[in-house]
Image: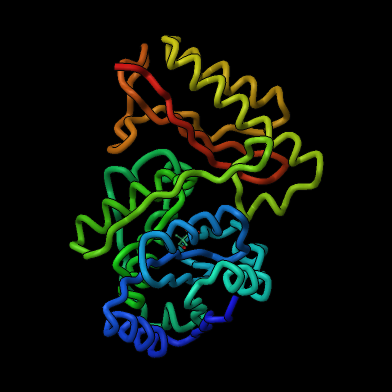
Amino acid sequence: MTDTLRIVRTERALRGQVWEYRGHGETTAFVPTMGALHEGHLTLVRLAKKKADRVVVSIFVNPTQFAPGEDLDAYPRTEKADVKLLRAEGVDLVYIPKPDSMYNAHHATTIKVGGVADGLETDHRPTFFDGVALVVTKLFNRVAPDIAVFGEKDYQQLATIRRLVEDLDMPIKIIGAPIARDEHGLALSSRNAYFDEEGLRTARRLNEIMRNCAAQMARGENVDVARDIARKSLLAAGFSGVDYIEVRSPNSLTVLEGGVLNAPARLLVAAHCKGVRLIDNFPVKVST
Ligand code: PAF
């Protein structure tokens, strides 16, 4: 394959290149990432390639979405390997901004998305989506893509970005990509790199336990009973804590009260395994 990847570190060069694409009548799809790329990211890139003429990927570990005490400093930074993977995928441009160029000393603007961003992650990471909304808005303004691709693994994040784009009239089509899983069903995540073998074995139980939970609900089990069984099963499997197991409506993420489901739903989970916080989600296929 001919090497067409351009590595860009300044906003000026980025804007110039994307304008050049546009000048040639080409569309741009954008995949924002925090690096430490794995097969999950590459599925986003492949989807982006199908949807537009050019693909731009950003790599930026965004400090505003980490709370004090979270793993900002430890977050894996693997730029060389990331660039190699993106080159092999035929990505056109990788944007790697310098940290101080994203947030200068005078930065004073925040963005808060309500509705879909309330509850779930926000109950445990209160400022997380503020940081995501801020950096995604800044990246969207800089890249000015036609399309942007986000993974369904971060289901609430995807819903939050959709709301942000609609509410702020951003002319960008948001596409959700299905969750990429390993052969045991564990959703791929950069944080899986923190696991030793035993941790990985335990983490892989999440998929089986939550799929059973979704299947029970789909068969008409009471939601609270099914959630309770799943919570106990996770703890018995070696998880040290469960932040939430919740069932929401698939698009608006409205809380579905206890009882029996009578429409398709989404089961969302966050749980701690050997010091790593895992999130995942599953469709609950209730026939209507
Ligand atoms: O999903 C992620 O990796 C990040 O939250 C994102 C969207 C790149 C913003 O930093």
Q: Is residue 42 left or right of residue 53?
A: right
**Image position, residue 25 (x, y; %):** 26, 78
- Depth check, front residue: 7 or 131: 7
For the point 73% across and 34% down, which residue is it?
202
Q: Is residue 246 left or right of residue 74?
A: left
For the point 62% across and 63% down, which residue is it?
36
For the point 46% across and 47% down, which residue is it?
154
Figure disc tally: 0
**Image position, residue 85 (x, y; %):** 62, 68
The image quadrant where one finds the C terminus is top left
Relative height, residue 124 to residue 236 (above, below): below
- Depth check, front residue: 79 or 137: 79
**Image position, residue 246 (x, y; %):** 44, 29
**Image position, residue 105 (x, y; %):** 42, 83
- Please tell me in which quadrant of the rendered image residue 181 appears: top right
What kind of colouring is applied to the model shown?
rainbow
Q: Residue furthest right?
A: 197
Relative height, residue 20 to residue 40 (above, below): below
Q: Is residue 256 left or right of residue 178?
A: left
Q: Is residue 124 left or right of residue 111?
A: right
The image quadrant where one finds the N terminus is bottom right
For the point 40% across and 31% down, which residue is it?
266
